[in-house]
């Protein structure tokens, strides 16, 4: 084979060949995920939406080593920069998804919640002891896993990471699911081969759910009342835990308290160092969450909030931020054509997109979340519907960028196009809320991703669309010597 | 002519013996006269103030201001009292269940979808405690019905008094019960939690199931028609008890109850009944008010379920169920009010009172639990009003029958005065006397 | 324009569904109900009288009252006014599940946290004359959760429904229901086991209370090493029962199980507040009266399960005759709409007087819930919770015309008719808006070829060198 002969003749040349071939042989996904090493970019002639400052009609942004080096109408272009002429395009900060299961979807089945198995068949033998209800320690209680970190469960190869990025989302707050104290949420950038490189901040908040997913016959708690009692008791136990250990540490003669993984993990919550995210939709549910938070003096972020507009003034008063869901209730697809929707359901459905405007009007701080919406494009589309229903466009953009950054305490790093911030950017063909707008390029930590539609590109490894690389696969078949 | 006188004497003595026997039999059941009462006849005679009613041999033999009193009649002073026809409860499960939570006491719902041959008549428990409890508030006859499936079986109309079902039965087979297929999504209610869970079926699926079921039902009727013709032509045709049971239905000799609640289901049931040429009645009729004009046009009577119920939909008016009788009355539809739960049959008059509170007249209310059910069930020649020749089912009260505080003073079923003692009165007496 | 329209709709919807725009703080301070037949329940009937209401309370009641200038006058000639009906046992307005049936003892759960002010049954019961109800945990457990007393102030939020100052309660259940509810394999399975669970729980509660007393003593005396015992949400309410601070509502049918519970109460030094349903109460009226337990029963339900087979409609009357304080309850949103009729049945069955019958649904349940200083009769100083009927409430034909709570009209049969129209209009508007939205939403198929690519190609003016891209 000519190639092998070449190798023996020139080790350096052969080495180059080997390197290039190796690179080209890497699985497309890993190549996609790893991107290339972050070079220097100069994006020119774009309409720049910094969010933290007025729009620049024709501006330039320089990125170096994953950080924004310069932003302006008239910025010098470094000599080593790769120039991207973005005339006709709009440059936004990378969008931030306020709460989602992205990156964890495949991890849900491997839940660490110890679920009791309900084996069908002959009934279990009746317990012998009359004490039918041993009080479970917090570590034994079903659904109490506050120590679970989303960052530890992340799957960098998740399909939804890729599809989110293709929709313009560069950062997401991911939450573990399952149980009551489901765990801790982590803020991740949506690009990377390994979890370590993707994590912006963890933990950002605890995730606590007051919904009961268990039905009858599956153990305690089986009702929302039971779940709330469980949460209360666990938080009380967490308070006592801290007190008991303080007493013990200060008084060697005192009895040593038990150690508890769960209660230990909850201490930052009890000390208000880390907030908790609670889902709630109706004003009654939201008020319930606020009362619980007040009773235990924990800092709360509201999630979902589909009817939060109705209680907006209270949220404003208590300074509670909202991660607003845009998974609007939909009409049943296979509905009875003569069936009549209940008025409250109809009202909820029709008024849902107007909730964001109501929050904005009341001065409530809010970001948007995709939750478990399967298609990230629907997420953006539904935010656009909120704009159509009356939400101020600029506030909407901010709610997808700087506001979540503020809520999560990373506003100095991401959320706007400013010097020294992380180079998370998206180049799109028009206003982000226009239905025809396409995402062209996405930058995550300064690495560029060319977003192409799947049906215009054969899903094969490494088909560069630029001029052929000397070491490209085509070149393999071309005689080189 | 040797034997003529002999024969004559035999005939004479037979006649004498016969007359004696009849007299003795009559003597077993005394005659009654209720006199000087307010008699609500529900007939063209209207309400007779200070009237009297004569009961003999199980029948009403006289009604009016002045009547001829039979010899030896027991007199009931009716001054200040009211006499009404015994109420007819046109739908229930009386005698087919004792304690619903205890499955072995339940006999109304047999397995299977098509059971025309089953007869409620055969399963009635005449000693059910529910029977006396029901009658002492003035309900003297009741329809008892089988449940479940599409064709549930044959109902029975019975008097609420008698040693055996044979004695109690007025119509052994009082009408075929058909649960007409529904286009509504089936709902399950979990008691206590009040949660409604709707199993996920697309409307397409529901429609398909509905059409299949209607087709099947129609085929059963067609088979019965064919069977009837075959039997007539060739008596040796093997018997088929199920088809046999449907023959009176397809020949129009027996009525069919089509259970349907929503407006759409009722419309479909009516169209079906017409297409199949049935003598039919709508049972249930929760939304009958929405199709009242259609029911009037097609002359379809309605046996309503209990109207003292919560509205079905969240945004229905709070009195949506209470006002159905008003709408039917306005449209001129013939309807019966019922108290279907066997343990609550005694509250039948209050169904009528409630309907009156929410829009029908006193006459309409009373009729809806007496003459109308009798008409709908095809026994108005015998029951439902106080008229000469009708069966003496009567209730004597100290006031308005439909009012709650009214007390029943006397009760007659088939011309017999019936004791007002029940399990409840016995327990009451017993514990009243506990020191 | 669109935003304004949708906001207007939202606000209108709130007002419409709330029932009446003029209510609560916005409503009139002074109201007079004039010239009605007043059934005071506490001191007889005033054949033709008036009631002056000020600041939510009954200020005056008598044959004539002073009508201050500016007062809202409700002409009630020919009509009847009685105290608002108090239903001491319901599961109204809950969205927490009614039962936590998984364990035998769930006293840590609370209905009060899950009051659902949007439950339309609140409005329906209001239209039936109910103004206050005790909404309780279900009967799936020997010891269930804590309940709540609420006024049916339709339109207010969850906190706005609470009857402030009502004594807290705890639910117990005896008999068939707590044994193996819903096929769960869980102890207990017999009435013996039910007693066992209750005695065991109170025993633990006693120990718990003692531990806390000891801790408070030690820490009060300055002991720095005193470790607080764990605050146990399950045992707290039980300890409160032992201290007489929390009322017990005990679901029970059979006579023997009620005697058992009274025995337990005697042993642990508290009083059973009320037996709920108590369908065999008439058999042990003497013992109930001696203990001082209220019997809260149905008018005439019977036979639906074995333990209800000896139920008789004379129950309420018989127990009343024998000195038991008796109330009627509904345990059902449907039954609650005609409690006046259920009370009337107790005149028919057992011969209670009209006054005694009305007490079953007003003053007696008020006493049962220990709120009789506030409600339950028409007396000056009490809350203005009133029902105006077109006829005597014990008549089957009586239809509530107006229902007032704290002096505000929360149900008005005329306004109800208007509300229906408004709701129909709202529905039309919403459906139209929905239709318009759906037309606009004509979906673009995802990944549509043609348009997108063309745009892409023409704007790509500079091809990045060396073809290095992210993909």
Image (spheres, grey):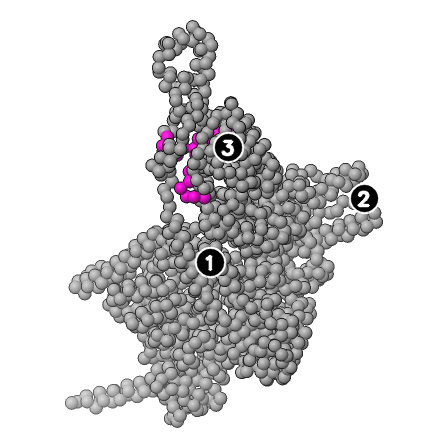
Q: Which residue is mark 3?
A: A60
State which region is magenta. A433-457
Question: Gap between marks 2 and 3, in whole Å?
Answer: 65 Å
Task: Describe the element under mark 1 as helix, strand or loop.
Answer: helix
Q: Secondary structure at mark 3?
A: strand
Chain letter, disc 2 residue: C
Image quarter hosting the C terminus of chain A:
top left
- Looking at the rendered structure, whether the residues under marks 3 and 1 are on a common chain is answered as no
For label 1, the residue is C5
Discs 2/3, front:
3
Chain letter of disc 1 in the image: C
> Which label is found at residue A344?
none
- Mark 3 neighbour class, 10 Å CA radius: few under 14, some 14 to 19, many 20 or more: many
Whether A137 is among the magenta residues is no
**Front position among marks 1 and 2:** 1
Which structural element holds mark 2? Answer: loop
């Amino acid at each position: 084979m000519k190639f092998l002969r070449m190798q023996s003749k020139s080790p350096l040349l052969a080495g180059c060949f080997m390197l290039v071939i190796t690179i080209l042989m890497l699985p497309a996904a890993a190549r996609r995920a790893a991107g290339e090493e972050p070079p220097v970019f100069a994006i020119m002639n774009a309409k720049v939406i910094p969010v933290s400052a007025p729009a620049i009609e024709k501006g330039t942004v320089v990125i170096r080593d994953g950080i924004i080096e310069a932003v302006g109408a008239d910025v010098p272009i470094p000599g080593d920069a790769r120039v991207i002429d973005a005339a006709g395009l709009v440059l936004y900060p990378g969008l931030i998804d306020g709460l989602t299961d992205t990156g964890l979807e495949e991890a849900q089945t491997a839940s660490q919640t110890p679920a009791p198995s309900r084996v069908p068949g002959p009934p279990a033998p009746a317990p012998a002891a009359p004490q039918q209800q041993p009080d479970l320690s917090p570590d034994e209680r079903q659904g109490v896993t506050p120590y679970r970190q989303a960052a530890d469960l992340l799957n960098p190869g998740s399909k939804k990471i890729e599809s989110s990025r293709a929709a313009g989302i560069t950062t997401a707050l991911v939450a573990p699911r399952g149980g009551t104290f489901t765990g801790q949420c982590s803020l991740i950038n949506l690009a990377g081969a390994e979890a370590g490189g993707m994590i912006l901040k963890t933990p950002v908040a605890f995730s606590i759910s007051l919904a009961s997913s268990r039905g009858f016959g599956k153990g305690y708690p089986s009702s929302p009342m039971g779940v709330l009692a469980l949460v209360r008791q666990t938080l009380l136990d967490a308070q006592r835990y801290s007190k008991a250990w303080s007493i013990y540490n200060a008084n060697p003669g005192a009895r040593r308290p038990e150690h508890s993984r769960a209660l230990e993990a909850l201490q930052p919550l009890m000390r208000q160092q880390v907030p908790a995210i609670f889902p709630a939709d109706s004003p009654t549910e939201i008020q319930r969450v606020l009362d619980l938070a007040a009773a235990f003096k924990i800092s709360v972020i509201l999630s979902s909030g589909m009817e939060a507009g109705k209680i907006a003034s209270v949220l404003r008063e208590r300074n509670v931020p909202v991660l607003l869901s845009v998974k609007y209730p939909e009409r049943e697809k296979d509905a009875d054509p003569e069936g009549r929707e209940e008025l409250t359901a109809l009202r909820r459905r029709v008024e849902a997109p107007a909730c964001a405007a109501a929050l904005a009007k009341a001065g409530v701080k809010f970001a948007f979340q995709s939750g478990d919406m399967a298609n990230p494009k629907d997420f953006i589309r539904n935010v656009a519907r909120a704009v159509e229903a009356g939400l101020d466009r600029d506030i909407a953009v901010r709610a997808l960028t700087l506001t979540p950054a503020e809520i999560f305490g990373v506003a100095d790093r991401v959320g706007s196009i400013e010097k020294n911030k992380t180079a998370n950017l998206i180049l799109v063909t028009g206003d982000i809320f226009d239905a025809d707008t396409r995402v062209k390029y996405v930058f995550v930590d300064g690495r560029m991703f060319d977003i192409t539609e799947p049906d215009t590109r054969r899903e094969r490894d490494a088909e560069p669309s630029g001029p052929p690389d000397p070491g490209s696969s085509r070149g393999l078949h071309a005689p080189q010597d | 002519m040797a034997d003529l006188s002999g024969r004559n004497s035999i005939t004479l003595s037979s006649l004498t013996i016969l007359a004696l026997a009849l007299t003795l039999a009559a003597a077993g059941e005394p005659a009654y006269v209720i006199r000087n009462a307010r008699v609500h006849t529900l007939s063209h005679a209207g309400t007779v103030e200070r009237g009297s009613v004569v009961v003999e041999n199980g029948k009403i033999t006289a009604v009016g201001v002045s009547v001829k009193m039979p010899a030896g009649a027991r007199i009931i002073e009716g001054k200040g009292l009211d006499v009404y026809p015994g109420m007819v409860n046109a739908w229930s499960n009386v005698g087919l269940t004792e304690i619903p939570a205890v499955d072995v006491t339940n006999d109304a719902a047999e397995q299977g979808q098509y059971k025309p041959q089953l007869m409620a008549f055969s399963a009635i428990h005449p000693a059910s405690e529910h029977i006396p409890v029901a009658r002492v508030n003035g309900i003297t006859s009741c329809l008892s019905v089988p449940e479940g499936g599409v064709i549930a079986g044959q109902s029975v109309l019975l008097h609420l008094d008698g040693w055996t079902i044979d004695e109690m039965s007025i119509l052994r087979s009082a009408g075929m019960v058909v649960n007409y297929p529904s286009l509504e999504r089936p709902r399950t209610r979990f008691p206590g939690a009040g949660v409604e869970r709707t199993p996920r079926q697309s409307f397409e699926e529901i429609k398909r199931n509905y059409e299949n079921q209607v087709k099947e039902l129609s085929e059963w009727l067609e088979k019965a028609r064919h069977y009837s013709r075959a039997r007539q032509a060739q008596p040796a045709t093997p018997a088929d008890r199920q088809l046999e049971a449907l023959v009176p239905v397809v020949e129009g000799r027996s009525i069919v109850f089509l259970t349907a609640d929503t407006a759409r289901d009722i419309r479909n049931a009516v169209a079906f009944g017409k297409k199949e040429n049935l003598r039919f009645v709508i049972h249930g009729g929760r939304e009958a008010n929405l199709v009242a004009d259609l029911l009037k046009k097609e002359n379809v009577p309605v046996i309503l379920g209990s109207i003292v119920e919560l509205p079905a939909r969240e945004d229905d008016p709070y009195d949506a169920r209470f006002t159905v009788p008003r709408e039917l009355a306005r449209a001129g539809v013939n309807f019966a009010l019922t108290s279907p739960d066997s343990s609550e049959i005694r509250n039948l008059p209050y169904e009528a009172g409630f309907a009156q509170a929410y829009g029908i007249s006193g006459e309409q209310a009373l009729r809806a639990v007496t003459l109308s059910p009798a008409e709908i069930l095809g026994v108005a020649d015998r029951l439902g009003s106080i008229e000469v020749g009708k069966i003496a089912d009567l209730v004597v009260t100290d006031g308005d029958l439909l009012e709650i505080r009214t007390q029943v003073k006397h009760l007659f079923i088939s011309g017999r005065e019936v004791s007002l003692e029940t399990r409840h009165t016995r327990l009451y007496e017993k514990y009243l006397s506990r020191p | 324009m669109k935003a304004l329209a949708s906001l207007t709709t939202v606000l209108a919807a709130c007002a419409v569904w709330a029932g009446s725009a003029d209510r609560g703080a916005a409503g009139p301070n002074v109201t007079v109900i004039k010239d009605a037949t007043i059934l005071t329940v506490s001191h007889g009937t005033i054949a033709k009288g008036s009631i002056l209401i000020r600041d939510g309370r009954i200020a005056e009641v008598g044959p004539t009252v002073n009508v201050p200038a500016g007062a809202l006058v409700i002409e009630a000639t020919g009509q009847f006014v009685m105290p608002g009906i108090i239903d001491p046992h319901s599961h109204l307005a809950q969205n927490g599940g009614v039962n936590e049936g998984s364990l035998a003892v769930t006293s840590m759960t609370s209905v009060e946290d899950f009051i659902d002010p949007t439950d339309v049954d609140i409005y329906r019961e209001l239209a039936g004359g109910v103004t206050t109800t005790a909404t309780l945990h279900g009967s799936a457990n020997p010891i269930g959760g804590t309940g709540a007393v609420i006024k049916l102030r339709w339109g207010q939020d969850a906190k706005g429904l609470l009857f402030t100052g009502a004594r807290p309660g705890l639910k117990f259940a005896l008999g068939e229901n707590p044994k193996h509810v819903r096929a769960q394999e869980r102890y207990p399975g017999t009435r013996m086991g039910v007693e066992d669970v209750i005695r065991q729980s109170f025993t633990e509660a006693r120990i718990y209370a003692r531990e806390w007393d000891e801790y408070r003593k030690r820490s009060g005396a300055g002991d720095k090493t005193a470790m607080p015992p764990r605050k146990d949400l399950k045992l707290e309410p039980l300890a409160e029962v032992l201290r007489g601070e929390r009322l017990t509502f005990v679901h029970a049918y059979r006579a023997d199980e009620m005697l058992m519970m009274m025995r337990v109460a005697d042993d642990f030094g508290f009083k059973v507040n009320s037996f709920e349903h108590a369908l065999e109460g008439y058999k042990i009226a003497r013992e109930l009266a001696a203990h001082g337990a209220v019997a809260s029963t149905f008018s005439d339900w019977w036979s639906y399960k074995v333990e209800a087979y000896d139920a008789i409609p004379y129950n309420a009357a018989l127990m009343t005759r024998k000195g038991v304080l008796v109330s009627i309850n509904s345990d059902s949103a449907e039954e609650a709409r005609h409690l006046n009729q259920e009370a009337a049945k107790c005149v028919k069955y057992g011969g209670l007087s009209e006054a005694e019958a009305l007490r079953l649904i007003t003053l007696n349940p008020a006493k049962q819930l220990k709120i009789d200083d506030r409600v339950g009769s028409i007396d000056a100083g009490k809350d203005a919770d009133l029902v105006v009927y077109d006829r005597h409430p014990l008549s089957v034909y009586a239809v509530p015309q107006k229902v007032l709570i704290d002096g505000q009209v929360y149900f008005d049969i005329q306004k109800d008719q208007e509300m229906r129209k408004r709701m129909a209009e709202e529905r039309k508007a919403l459906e139209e808006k929905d239709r318009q939205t759906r037309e606009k939403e004509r979906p673009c198929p995802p990944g549509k070829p043609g348009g997108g690519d063309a745009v892409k190609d023409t704007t790509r003016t500079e091809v990045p060198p060396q073809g290095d891209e992210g993909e």
